[in-house]
């Protein structure tokens, strides 16, 4: 079982059990499969261009190689930022008290590039923090489910279903000005009836 | 994927405008300082060295055979770089299919169990066709929307000329004033989801806006999930 999310609010630590939430767990999932003449599921394989070798599951691996052809083990590698500077690994924040900031402007949540969503089961549902979130206030804290090369940001929100952490990276969004030309990249009346199940 | 979207405003006037994806800063990557590493896929076994083949040749417990005779090692094959390949399908017996397989759509319940098998339907993109993406008139306060929906992606809408600048600036100004997002929808009634590419994911779209002097920001937030707790344990969780 994962460690708790520990949030420090007004000098008091509050524990929450995190459960990752995704669309498949809420609504199920659709996927396409290939079947043979008998209706049994097919498996995918790869054929070399000259047809000489059929590559099936378990026959390949992948990795990084230095210019001299040497295989580079994962534990030799370090984190590098976009200019090639070494980046230290950031530990998981689970089990470690994180300072809660806020309440924050709800609009800030719209400037988050969300990468994951967690339902947070509070140990104490009547705590001051949970009560404040249930009343509509939104907070933020640092959040790393696992150790990584960055510390992510979580916005903490609550609704009738429970408490949630929206985890991701804040984004800087440029303003659109009249003189700037757009360049394409290369590549019924009640909101309660919004149907997400059929998406 | 198209980078243009046809959007109608509250009065039903529509225009084709540009959009671009919004992403967080590029994440650090693993590597060696000052060394350009190359990512490669390579062979670690020949067809005689896979688990399936070894079980056929030596039985379920083939560890002794590996230690004594190294039957899994093929020095001619192992280590070869795998570059371009063609995808083929194998039937249940492991033989290559010589004709196209039948493709089915499998619908799974939240617990991972199978709900339905059906013929797949191709779905076209619907954001830049004859019918515009409509301004539904359903405004939701931002403070409620961010507590109710998970926004998986956001794109920034941008004008392509002077006329569309006025068109989008007015939308952004209205949404900022109301501190709300506007539900956008597709189809004649404007109630359908947005599909950005053929057979792509379907989203509910929510438009938010900000203005600063003559500048504006108009963002379309895309959601395929409400903020709810899963009620059934998933088979893979």
Image (cartoon, coloured by chain):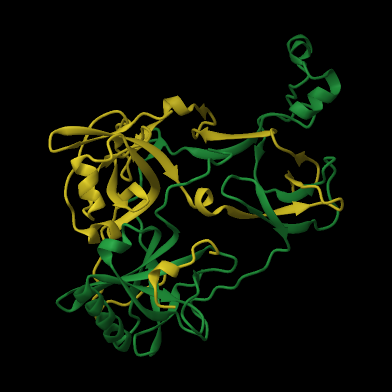
Relative vertical location of residue B199 with respect to residue B137 in this rendering, above or below: above
The quarter of the picture where residue A185 lies is bottom left
Q: Where residue B182 sits in the image (x, y, percent)?
A: 33, 74
Q: From the viewer's perspective, is A75 left or right of B116? A: left
Viewer-closest of B32 and A112 = A112
- Residue at (80% x, 23% y) in the render: B55
Q: From the viewer's perspective, is B153 left or right of B64? A: left
Q: Where residue A41 sits in the image (x, y, percent)?
A: 77, 47
* Number of numbered labels in the structure image: 0
Q: Where residue A16 sits in the image (x, y, percent)?
A: 32, 36
The quarter of the picture where residue A99 lies is top left
Relative vertical location of residue B80 with respect to residue B194 in this rendering, above or below: above
Drawing shade for chain A: yellow
Drawing shade for chain B: green
The quarter of the picture where residue B210 lies is bottom left
- Residue at (58% x, 45% y) in the render: B111
Viewer-closest of A195 and B16 = A195
């Amino acid at each position: 079982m994962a460690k708790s999310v520990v949030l420090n609010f007004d000098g008091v630590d509050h524990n929450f059990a995190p459960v990752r939430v995704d669309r498949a767990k809420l609504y199920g999932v659709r996927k396409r499969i290939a079947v043979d003449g008998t209706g049994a599921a097919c498996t995918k394989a790869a054929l070399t261009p000259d047809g000489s070798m059929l590559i099936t599951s378990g026959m390949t691996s992948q990795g990084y190689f230095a210019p001299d052809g040497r295989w580079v083990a994962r534990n030799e590698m370090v984190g590098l930022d976009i200019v090639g500077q070494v980046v230290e690994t950031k530990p998981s924040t689970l089990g470690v008290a994180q300072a809660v900031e806020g309440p924050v402007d709800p609009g800030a949540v719209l400037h988050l590039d969300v990468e994951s969503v967690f339902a947070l089961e509070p140990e104490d549902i009547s705590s001051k923090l949970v009560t404040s979130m249930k009343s509509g206030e939104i907070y933020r804290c640092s959040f790393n489910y696992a150790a990584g090369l960055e510390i992510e940001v979580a916005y903490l929100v609550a609704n009738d279903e429970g408490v949630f952490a929206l985890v991701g990276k804040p984004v800087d969004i440029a303003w659109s000005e009249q003189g700037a030309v757009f360049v394409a990249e290369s590549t019924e009346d009640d909101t309660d009836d919004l149907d997400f199940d059929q998406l | 994927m198209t980078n243009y979207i046809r959007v109608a405003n509250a009065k039903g006037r529509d225009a084709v405008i540009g959009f671009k994806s919004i992403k967080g800063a590029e994440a650090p990557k693993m590597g060696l300082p000052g060394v350009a590493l190359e990512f490669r896929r390579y062979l670690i076994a020949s067809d005689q060295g896979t688990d399936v083949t070894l079980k056929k040749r030596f039985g379920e417990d083939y560890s002794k055979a590996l230690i004594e005779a190294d039957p899994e090692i093929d020095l001619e094959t192992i280590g070869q770089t795998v570059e371009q390949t063609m995808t083929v399908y194998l039937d249940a017996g492991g033989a290559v299919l010589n004709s196209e397989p039948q493709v089915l759509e499998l619908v799974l319940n939240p617990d991972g169990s199978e709900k339905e098998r059906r013929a797949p339907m191709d779905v076209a993109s619907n954001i830049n066709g004859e019918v515009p993406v409509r301004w539904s008139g359903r405004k939701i306060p931002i403070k409620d929307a961010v507590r109710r929906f998970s926004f998986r992606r956001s794109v920034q809408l941008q004008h392509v000329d002077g006329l569309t600048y006025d068109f989008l600036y007015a939308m952004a100004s209205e949404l900022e004033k109301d501190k709300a997002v506007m539900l956008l929808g597709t189809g004649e009634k404007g109630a359908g989801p947005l599909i950005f590419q053929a057979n792509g994911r379907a989203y509910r779209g929510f438009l938010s806006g900000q203005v600063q002097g003559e500048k504006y920001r108009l963002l379309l937030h895309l959601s395929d999930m409400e903020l709810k707790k899963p009620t059934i344990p998933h088979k893979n969780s």
